[in-house]
Image: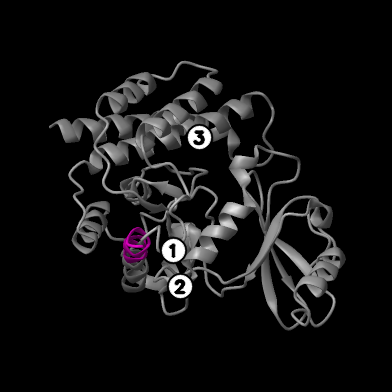
C-alpha cells in the first residue's frame, strides 16, 4: 500500500470522508492502484480494518461523457436492490477540489477478475464452466431489470441505438486511419445494410465479459464492475460481445488475453442458447450482433495500433496489436456470412 498515489491523496480523502460520513474511517488511509491506463482509475483504500474502492477518471482530462462518475455511481446504486450483484455505494463527490476530479467510493468486494485461460486453469474444468455459465445468468438478470422501476428510465436514448452505435464506431475508425485494412469498409457497410430490429431496451453494461466481474471462491459472480459504458439500449449488443469474447482465437503470443481456451469454458453457442432459454428473447439475429462486436474490437485495436505508430503508447505488446486487427475483421465478415447462409 502507498500513502501517496497519482490521482488520490489519502489525507484529503480521509478529511472528506470524515466530514461526509463521520465514523466510517477509523484511522489514516493507505491506497493502492488496482487498475490503470486509459480506463477510469480504480484504487483500494484501507484504514487497516475496513476497505473501500475509489473510482475516478484518468489523470489529465478526457471527454466528460467517456468517464462520467455520476453515471457509474447512479447505475450501481440503482441496481443495488435487484438480482444483479454490484458493490454497495458509499458516496459520490463531484467537487474536483478534493481529488482533482469527480470520484465515487464503493464497498470493497472480495473476488477475482479472471483475465486469461492461465488464470482459470487452477479452477479446473468444472469450476470454470460454472463461473462462465454464471456470467450468462447474471447478464440475463441485468437485462430483466425494469429500467423505470429501478429509476433508470432516462438513463439513455434507446431509439435508433444500433444506428448511432454503428456511426460512432465508423467515426472512430476514420480517426484511426493510418493504413489500408482489407475488408473493414466491407464489414462496416454490411453491418449498416443489415441492421436488425432491436428488442425492447434494457439497461446494458456495454463491456460485459469475465474480467469485468468478480468471481467468489464459490465460483459465483459476486460483483459486476466497470459500468462506464452502461446505458439504455439493445440487450443483444451485450450478448454479441460476450459471444465474441467466448470464441477461441488461435493467436500464439497474443498481447490480448482470452479466457475462451480454458478447459471447461463453454462454447459460445452454448452460452447463446442458455441466454435465449433463460431470457426468452429471440436471438435469431445474433450473428449481426457478434459481427458488430468483432468490428468494434477491430476499431479499438486499430486505434491502439495507430497511436503506437505515432509513438503515443507506453508498455510491452503494442508492437503486435496491429497484426491482430485483420483477424478480427475476418471473424466479423465470416460471422455475417454465416447468417446469410
Magenta stretch prevailing secondary structure: helix
Circle 1/circle 3 CB separation < 8 Å? no
In terms of depth relative to the viewer, which is nearer, 268 or 296? 296
Which type of secondary structure does the marked residue at label 1 adopt?
loop
Can the viewer see residue 29 in this picture? no
Mark 1 and mark 3: Cα distance apart in space: 32 Å
Can the viewer see residue 304 in this picture? yes
Circle 1/circle 2 CB separation < 8 Å? yes
N-term mark: 1 or 3 = 1
Q: Within 10 Å of the Cα at label 1, are there few (<14), some (14-19), or many (20+) other Cα atoms?
A: some
Q: Is residue 336 above or below residue 255?
A: above
Q: Which residues are magenta?
A: 136-145
Q: Position of residue 93 (x, y in %)?
A: 72, 59
**Label drawn at residue 252:** none
In the figure, residue 64 lies in which quadrant? top right
Q: Is residue 269 above or below residue 255?
A: below
* Magenta stretch: includes residue 35: no
Which is more foreground, mark 1 or mark 3? 1
Quadrant of the image for the C terminus?
A: top left
Residue identifier under label 3: 300
In terms of depth relative to the viewer, which is nearer, 102 or 184? 102
Residue identifier under label 1: 150
Which type of secondary structure does the marked residue at label 3 adopt?
helix
Q: Position of residue 306 (x, y in %)?
A: 58, 26
Mark 3 and mark 2: Cα distance apart in space: 34 Å
Residue at 74 percent of width and 80 percent of height = 24
Which type of secondary structure does the marked residue at label 2 adopt?
helix
Amino acid at each position: 500500500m502507498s500513502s501517496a498515489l497519482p490521482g488520490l491523496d489519502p489525507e484529503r480523502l480521509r478529511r472528506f470522508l470524515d466530514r461526509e460520513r463521520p465514523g466510517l474511517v477509523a484511522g489514516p488511509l493507505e491506497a493502492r492502484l488496482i487498475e490503470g491506463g486509459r480506463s477510469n482509475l480504480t484504487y483500494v483504500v484501507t484504514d487497516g480494518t475496513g476497505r473501500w474502492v475509489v473510482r475516478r477518471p484518468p489523470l489529465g482530462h478526457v471527454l466528460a461523457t467517456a468517464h462520467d462518475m455520476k453515471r457509474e455511481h447512479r447505475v450501481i446504486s440503482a441496481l443495488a436492490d435487484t438480482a444483479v450483484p454490484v458493490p454497495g455505494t458509499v458516496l459520490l463527490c463531484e467537487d474536483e477540489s478534493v481529488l482533482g476530479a469527480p470520484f465515487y467510493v464503493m464497498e470493497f468486494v472480495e473476488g477475482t477478475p479472471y483475465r486469461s485461460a492461465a488464470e482459470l486453469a487452477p479452477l479446473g474444468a468444472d469450476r470454470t464452466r460454472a463461473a462462465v455459465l454464471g456470467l450468462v445468468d447474471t447478464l440475463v438478470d441485468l437485462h430483466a431489470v425494469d429500467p423505470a422501476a429501478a429509476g433508470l428510465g432516462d438513463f439513455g436514448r434507446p431509439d435508433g441505438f444500433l444506428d448511432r452505435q454503428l456511426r460512432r464506431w465508423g467515426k472512430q475508425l476514420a480517426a484511426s486511419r493510418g493504413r489500408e485494412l482489407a475488408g473493414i469498409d466491407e464489414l462496416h457497410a454490411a453491418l449498416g445494410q443489415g441492421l436488425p430490429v432491436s428488442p425492447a431496451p434494457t439497461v446494458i453494461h456495454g463491456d460485459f465479459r469475465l474480467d469485468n466481474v468478480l468471481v467468489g471462491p464459490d465460483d459465483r459472480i459476486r460483483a459486476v464492475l466497470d459500468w462506464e459504458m452502461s446505458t439504455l439500449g439493445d440487450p443483444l449488443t451485450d450478448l454479441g460481445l460476450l459471444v465474441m469474447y467466448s470464441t477461441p482465437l488461435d493467436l500464439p503470443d497474443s498481447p490480448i488475453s482470452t479466457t475462451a481456451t480454458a478447459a471447461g469454458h463453454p462454447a459460445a453457442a452454448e452460452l447463446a442458447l442458455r441466454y435465449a432459454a433463460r431470457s426468452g428473447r429471440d436471438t435469431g439475429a445474433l450473428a449481426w450482433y457478434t459481427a458488430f462486436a468483432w468490428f468494434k474490437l477491430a476499431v479499438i485495436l486499430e486505434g491502439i495500433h495507430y497511436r503506437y505508430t505515432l509513438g503515443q503508447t507506453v508498455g510491452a505488446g503494442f508492437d503486435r496489436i496491429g497484426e491482430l486487427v485483420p483477424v478480427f475483421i475476418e471473424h466479423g465478415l465470416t460471422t455475417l456470412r454465416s447468417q446469410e447462409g
